[in-house]
Image (cartoon, grey):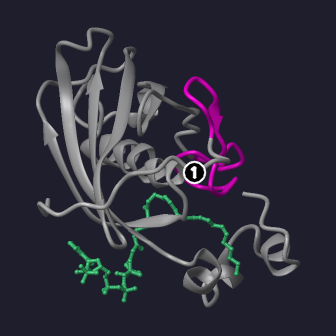
Amino acid sequence: MPEELDELVRHPKTSRPGEPMRPHNMVCFGCGEQSPRGLHLEMFAGEGFSVVAEMPVEHWMEGGPGVIHGGILSSAFDDVMGMTPRLIGPAAVTVHLQVDFMRPIPVGETLHLRAEILGKQGRKIYTEGVAHLGDPTTPVARAHGIFVTIDARKHFAEHVERSARADEFKAGKPQV
Ligand SMILES: CCCCC/C=C\C/C=C\C/C=C\C/C=C\CCCC(=O)SCCNC(=O)CCNC(=O)[C@H](O)C(C)(C)COP(=O)(O)OP(=O)(O)OC[C@H]1O[C@@H](n2cnc3c(N)ncnc32)[C@H](O)[C@@H]1OP(=O)(O)O
């Protein structure tokens, strides 16, 4: 992370600590409540520049016998960390995601995820994610990610046709 960082300012309209964070797209694999096969993560604003979520580890998420698939864990981190830019303003997309798998995460447990903005420089937002199974002093995974702010309308303009919600988006009502 660079040494010279911008000041972080909470967006006046963002959720307050304890309040839900709205999905950025109802059919998002991570947080969309209408995603047919998604993680259906419900996220809440936390203290400071953080976002928290809990994810029950279900059988369909299995990788190794009885434990979570690494890609599922990475997806959960991606989405929770990807929600943190909302705390300060514009939408942002992942350009870099690095995950440390520290302990096996068993099926049947509930994974507690917390993501936080570490710093911002220009369009780049540096974030960290931590996961535990109920004891915050014993993390089971940690992630670092860089998100770059975008103008969502322009960024998705040439792909929005392919969305399951293309009609809504084209009608100019992106109810995200
Ligand atoms: C038409 C209606 C549509 C309506 C849509 C409505 C609502 C939707 C709303 C919100 C949805 C928003 C977000 C979704 C959020 C979360 C989902 C989970 C997260 C994801 O799953 S998201 C999917 C995976 N994600 C991608 O699909 C990104 C692919 N990517 C790109 O599209 C380009 O990469 C882009 C545009 C990001 C940047 O491109 P660009 O040309 O604009 O800018 P540039 O390349 O200059 O990068 C700018 C600065 O980032 C630095 N930088 C770049 N890459 C780096 C790297 N890897 N490591 C370190 N630094 C990096 C550069 O070094 C420079 O830094 P500096 O400014 O200091 O020079």
Quadrant in which the C terminus is drawn: bottom right
Quadrant in which the N terminus is drawn: bottom left
The magenta stretch is 15-37
Chief secondary structure of the magenta portion: loop
Residue 3, horizontal then vertical, whole percent? 11, 60
Q: Is residue 162 left or right of residue 95?
A: right
- Which residue was labeled with disc 1? 11
In the rendered image, the residue lying farthest to the bottom is 158
**Residue 76 versus residue 173: which sits nearer the camera?**
173
Residue 46, horizontal then vertical, whole percent? 47, 28
Give me the residue at 56% from left, 78% from top: 151
Q: Relative to 127, is 39 above or below?
A: above
Secondary structure type for disc 1? loop
Q: Residues within 10 Å of mark 1 (few under 14, many from 20)?
A: some
Q: Quadrant of ligand 1?
A: bottom left
**Residue 112 versus residue 103: which sits nearer the camera?**
112
